[in-house]
Amino acid sequence: MQIVVRVLAVVILALSPLAVPSPASAAPVKCAAGDLTPDGRVFPEPMVSLGFVKFTEFECGMKLLEKTYPNLLQITTVGTSKGGHPVYDVLLTDETVTAPKQKLLIVNSIHGNEPGGREGGLRVLEDLVDPQFEASKPYVQQALDRFVVHFLFPNPDGWVAGDVEPGVFSTASRGNDNGRDLNRQFPVKGWINTSNAPLAEPETKALMPLLSKGGWYLGTDNHGQGADTYGAAGLQIVGQFDFQKSETLARYADAISAAFAEVDVLSTLQAIGASSGQDAGAYHWGTLYDMLGYSASGSMIDFYNTFDGLNGTGYATEVTAGQHVNTATYGGLLTQMWVDSMRAINFTMLKQALVQKRYTFPIGGDVGYVYDPAVVRSSDGTGAKTSADEQETPYAVSRMRFFTDLDTYASRRLTPVNVADVLSGKVPLDRFDSLVLADNPKPGPGTASTWYAKLRTWVEKGGNLVVTDAAAPAIPRIGAVPNSDNLVRSDKKYVGYVDFTDRTHPLAKGLRGVARQTYDSVPIGYAFPPAGENCPNWTIDQAAWEKAGGKTVATNGTGRTAYGELALGKGKVRFLGALLPQPTEEFFHPYGLQNYAVTYTGYTLLQNMLAYDAAGLGGGAAGGSASAPGGARSAPSGALPSTGGFPEVAALGALLIGLSLVRRRVGAARRTR
């Protein structure tokens, strides 16, 4: 794999002469109205540029744009970097509209050695104020009437470190002048890796007042990765996201996919992938773990998304071959691809911000969930600390919050059910078509044998028992699968996930993106390497499950069923071994914990499991089932601006595909976001 990546890098560098050479008299950036640039832009297109935009060129070009469009663009700074450079926050809004406005965030290259974000961001800024480009379009005018768009350039040190002349070795740095990765510095709720030293750097401290003011809506955080078979990878952030927020992000990702099809080189990648049947294309998306095989603690976009905090709705992107480290030759064609990718992402964000919809979580029949009164509290004295006198942000969390949040958006009410009420006969299970038993087979007091007997009787009458996580032992206890050694097992993994073995089954309906991860680790307190893999993933012996008549839809480990269903009498038992574990206090979490961290795939699988309406049970009509997720979704309209129709983009597309198709994603070998 490493040889292929090196070869691809050499080919990309060799393509740089395809860029149109600039006249000797042309300025690299227009800093005054009379300056000449190759294409007349303040920031020329990469294909006619001789090198990356330098920090000082960015400063003078932005000043010209501010002077030219004073009612739209305002340059501000939030502080000073470790190296003494201003940390810029460029504001974009129609200042003649004085009504209160929400805020949108665009983070440009928090890692200095990933220039695609800033190269695209500064040109997007110009596009959105200059009527020759995007500014005259109605959606831009509407967005700037309603929002203040913050273009944040948080790592000037890393940028300046790479500001060299073409042909000179670049020393662009990932971190700041203190060598610190700024994208691990933020005080997220959940597990914190102490080596990240949150809030230790001046850049992070300077950003906190800006971010903490609130009023945020959509956001995007733009990065670069190694060479991939796709033009870019979208990373859906995971935290305590209710269904509305999770679905908003998924629709955002779908809309970006549509927008990428309008970018010349990326549409070439898409066409080649479609015609060859290979895993290749313009854009694909999933969680960070789905896409790159790891998670993160303390990232800026995670902090932006934190519930009961900033409450933003943010997304991240990695552009292909986007880590420009120690590269002596500027590649205009590759940089053009990054810039056009940033256009697709950021223009889509503005369009999506204008379409704020309420989404419904459709379920079939009447649904109850078994209520667990257990609450994890900071006051219980069991939280992990690094010193005896360390204070924690107060918290009281429970996975039950997931159901109360979901009830807000469900097509039918989700009813909490106490075990004691069922055992006493106060609440008959026949009231429900489906019952969810999440992470505890029998919470609360009462006779276990009576509880399991009632569950079995109800399922045999037609009920749908949905069992998740540590509630898995209930399956043999009700006699659905004969008990045996190692029948039910919990293994510790990096995150909660499943590997699909049958995507045609109704329980797999509606999968979107790169669907694998079902819950995340950090928000609910579970540490990941180098602190070990700690997330509980429950499974059932596949041979025993299938011998009992069960269908395996996904596994987690060889011969272990992680997701599936089996018939019991007239009813069903549906099982998902990784969805909703209780938050843990075992690992360092100084800023508190979140209640749950279900991914968009987790929501989809639960929705499929609840697509059930039993004859003779519940209060609704008997028979039939609710529609499963994944119907047609509309994408924002409007074409992206032309980049000049450079015919060489097809050559780059073919080379990217041809050389990187053999590349396999190995999480341990990929760099950290």
Image (spheres, helix red, strand yellow):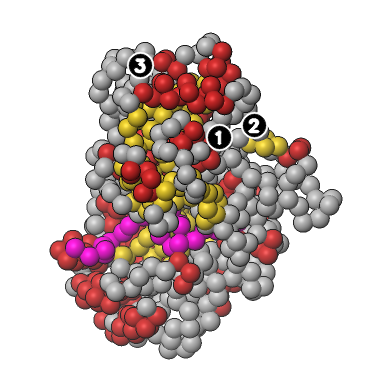
Camera-side residue of 347 and 189: 189
Tell me which residue sits at (52%, 77%) in the image.
Answer: 172
Q: CA distance from mark 3 to mark 1?
A: 24 Å
Q: Secondary structure at mark 1?
A: loop
Camera-side residue of 453 and 388: 453
Say whether residue 149 is magenta.
no
Q: Which residue is mark 1?
A: 440
Report whether 247 appears left or right of 213.
left
Sequence-wise first label, 1 or 2: 2
- Magenta extent: 277-304
- Residue 248 is drawn in which quadrant? top left
- Report the amino acid beneath label 3: Leu
Sequence-wise first label, 3 or 1: 1
Circles 3 and 1 in contact, beta carbons < 8 Å = no
Residue 592 place in picture, x, y as percent: 67, 44
Tell me which residue sits at (37%, 43%) in the image.
Answer: 545
- Residue 435 is drawn in which quadrant? top left
